Amino acid sequence: MIARLSEAQFDNALQDLTDILHRCVHAGASIGFVQPFSRQDAGVYWQGCVRPGLRAKTLDLFVAYCEGRCLGTVQLIPASMPNQPHRADVAKLLVHPQARRRGLGRALMAALEARAGELGKTLLVLDTRSTDPSRVLYQSIGFRIAGEIPDYCRNPAEDRLEPTTIMYKDLS
């Protein structure tokens, strides 16, 4: 089941969200963090970055529940600039490493796209490390490659730089 969380529901999912982020970083996900990365670091991200966005209503947080736990998440962040009312960013698509290959990522993205449509958004934008499996998922659901930036991000486990792929999807 996919749910869009309110700030009031956030605390009930916080432990699972913290676990997902921590485990994804340790499984090699390039999502802005590098190792060493503790559970406390993961909790600080959710409390310091996501909770304020929920409170201010500047982002939508989706979670995938399976077997009574939150096992996946993604964020929709509408552009805030006056010349971009049609656009939103996709951020932090995360699926617990033990729950992958079950369709949770696809289901989360479908819910995110539906919400983007409700908000009148016609363009979704994201970036992903060029070597990540998520790139294949995004392409399979209709995202197109706009380009690649070399040496964009640091590998989460090794001291080396890697390229990122900028992608978009036209919802109109």
Image: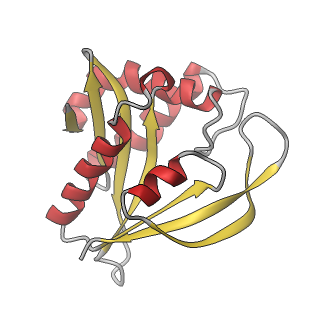
The N terminus lies in which quarter of the figure?
A: top left
Residue farthest toward the top in the current orientation of the protein:
68
66 left or right of 26 in image: left
Name the image quarter holding residue 25: top right
- Of residues 124 and 130, the one nearer the viewer is 130
User: What residue do we see at 51% from left, 52% from top?
Assistant: 136
Relative to 131, residue 70 above or below: above
The residue drawn where x is 33% and y is 81% is 82
Quarter-wise, where is residue 58 in the image? bottom left
Outermost left residue: 118
In the displayed structure, 95 sits above or below 131; it is: above
Expressed as whole percent of the image width and height from the top left, the position of residue 135 reads 53, 54
Relative to 83, residue 154 above or below: above
The mark total stands at 0
108 to the left or right of 147: left
Horizontal relation, residue 39 to residue 140: left or right: right
**Residue 102 point in image, percent of width and height:** 36, 30
In-front residue for pair 144/59: 144
Nearest the camera: 83 or 100?
Answer: 100
In the rendered image, residue 96, in percent from the top left (x then y), is placed at 46, 26
Which residue is pictured at 66% across the width and 27% down the height? Answer: 37
Colouring used for the render: secondary structure
Viewport quadrant of the C terminus? bottom left
In the image, farthest residue toward the right = 159
Say which quarter of the image contains residue 155. top right
Q: Residue at x 61, y 47 (%)?
A: 132
